[in-house]
Amino acid sequence: EAQVTQNPRYLITVTGKKLTVTCSQNMNHEYMSWYRQDPGLGLRQIYYSMNVEVTDKGDVPEGYKVSRKEKRNFPLILESPSPNQTSLYFCASSEWQGSNQPQHFGDGTRLSIL
Amino acid sequence: AQTVTQSQPEMSVQEAETVTLSCTYDTSESDYYLFWYKQPPSRQMILVIRQEAYKQQNATENRFSVNFQKAAKSFSLKISDSQLGDAAMYFCAYRSAGGNKLVFGAGTILRVKS
């Protein structure tokens, strides 16, 4: 089954404690992306990757890091989380940059930073 | 930069009736895609319908149809014969033809009354 898998689904942690949200896709997609969802703001792109070792900032990259060492994985790293990063996070993938196929979304990760 | 506006934070509809959700967008591009996503309480992002800007014909998917007005930059979603399972947050989204970043509206909560 084609899917994007995020882990964990929920996480409550404290300010400053480094955390990683993993994202993995099994569709051999080149393009992967992270979004955060906040009330009244919809989803906003954090970072994206067009292929292995190619990453770039989205609209709200501050406080986040990503890496793309393998095609299937695109982890989101919060080196020193702060309460303003409390949000719902989505990973998404698509075939390649500009593909006319819609993106596949993971099921979301609810992060609470205390 | 492209923007997407959903002016209705909440809407209600009686079961079996029809409801229309509004969406406007701003872009200087001529080739792009528009989407409606449904987010039920499970938080999944479910693609409801999509429209290619170069197509004049409005997209339809069973009970869901759109009214795409390219000159007015308007993209409304009509849900016919509303069902209890249609209750969710609905997001309108824009994507450039050559890119992959989705630009989302703030969302509209749809409540369905029995």
Image (cartoon, coloured by chain):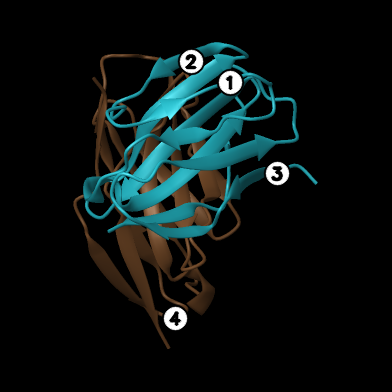
Chain colours: A cyan, B brown
Mark 4 or 2, closer to the camera: 2
The residue that disc 4 covers is B15
Q: Is residue A110 left or right of residue B61?
A: left
Tell me if residue A93 comes above or below residue A97 in the rendering.
below
Could you classify mark 2 by the number of other residues whose Cα lies within 10 Å: few (under 14), some (14-19), or many (20 or more)? some
Residue furthest to the left: B7
The residue that disc 2 covers is A55
Q: Which mark is residue A68?
A: 1
Give the residue at x 63% y 14%.
Answer: A52
Residue furthest to the right: A1
**Callout 1 touching callout 2 (CB < 8 Å):** yes
State whether residue B71 appears in this view. yes
Q: Which mark is residue A3?
A: 3
Give the residue at x 30% y 44%.
Answer: A16
Q: Chain of mark 3?
A: A
Q: Secondary structure at mark 4?
A: loop
